[in-house]
Image (tube, helix red, strand yellow):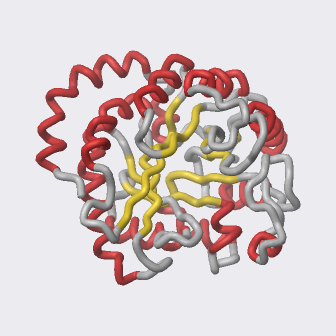
Amino acid sequence: MICKTRIGAILLATAATCSCLSLLAPAANAQEAAGSAGTWPFFSFCMDTHDTQKRTLPQQAAMLKDLGYAGCGHLWLNGVETRVAALSDAGLRLFQIYLRVDLSKPKPLDEKRLTEVLPLLKPHRTQLALLVVGGKPSDTALDDKAVAVVTRLADATKPFGVTVVLYPHVNHWLETCGDAVRIAEKVNRPGEVGAMFNLCHWMKGDGERDLNAVLRRAKPWLMAVSLSGSDTPGDVRTGKGNWIQPLDQGAYDVRELLNALRGIDYSGPVGIQCWGIKGDAAVHLERSMTAWRKVTGRADGRAVVE
């Protein structure tokens, strides 16, 4: 678990570093930082896992800048320094870092490495997106342990302006958006700890099939959303459909999700999930951006929240 005294000890030592890093921060106004600018900032993640071009992190940043993305997410804690520098140089934002939290272990996450990277994340207002494992999906018997871990993590990240979002993932302990909301409510740190909705994982593993009901329940805690092109929920659940595709592919009409988000006045970031999409990442990301602009009506890639 995260040690408060350890975090406190590095605050003074990193203050000067944070001040210097703020000069490298992507251009952003206070409204966007608060998620109230009337737009959904659009970022990509997992775009590098199957990229046949095997781009370096600086090359990825240049690609995203050229395609019009607001930034990206980053898997795990390796290479964070290079990712932050590349995005800052491009004027882009590191929206999320994905972390695995294992409730079955005495130390559920890498505390030492996290303390090293937290100061770098302040200029980007990064979210730590937690994939929580270590038990049977949705088993409430582990709620108290999860709440303790998340609370201590929120204490550690707060001085850096870093927030925590709970990332639902099929077959994980935290499997559904409802699980994320349940834990966020128990932690009860509005604006510091919240839930994420992932279209692909809702498609595949969430027993609640009423999308509007899921999002209405999540509304007070919803801090991030991801989507992708997909086949219909019925086909995905039965294994007949592809649940992660470029946004211009699949039988599912993503406007259903966007309309539901407008219905709850969601104004936070939206990420395009690219895990497992093969080929040149620049090609499928360009297609997804074109589709995003079409369904949102925004030439700059940011969706108007009406």
Count of all numbered marks drawn on residues in the image: 0
Q: Is residue 25 visible?
A: yes
Residue 268 coordinates in the image, percent (x, y): 56, 46
Q: Is residue 293 visible?
A: no
Q: Residue at x 14, y 41 (%)?
A: 8
**Residue placed most toward the observer, 224 or 247:** 247
Quadrant containing the N terminus is: bottom left
Q: Residue at x 75, y 61 (%)?
A: 243
**Residue placed most toward the observer, 91 or 38:** 91
Q: Going by the image, does 206 lie left or right of 22?
A: right
For residue 93, above or below residue 198: above
For residue 63, above or below residue 266: above
**Residue placed most toward the observer, 224 or 99:** 99
Q: Going by the image, does 6 lie left or right of 186?
A: left
Residue 106 image-quadrant placement:
bottom left
Residue 14 image-quadrant placement:
top left
For residue 168, above or below residue 224: below
Residue 66 coordinates in the image, percent (x, y): 70, 21
For residue 144, above or below residue 222: below
Residue 277 coordinates in the image, percent (x, y): 74, 47
Q: Residue at x 51, y 44 (%)?
A: 75
Q: Residue at x 49, y 29 (%)?
A: 83
Residue 175 coordinates in the image, percent (x, y): 53, 71
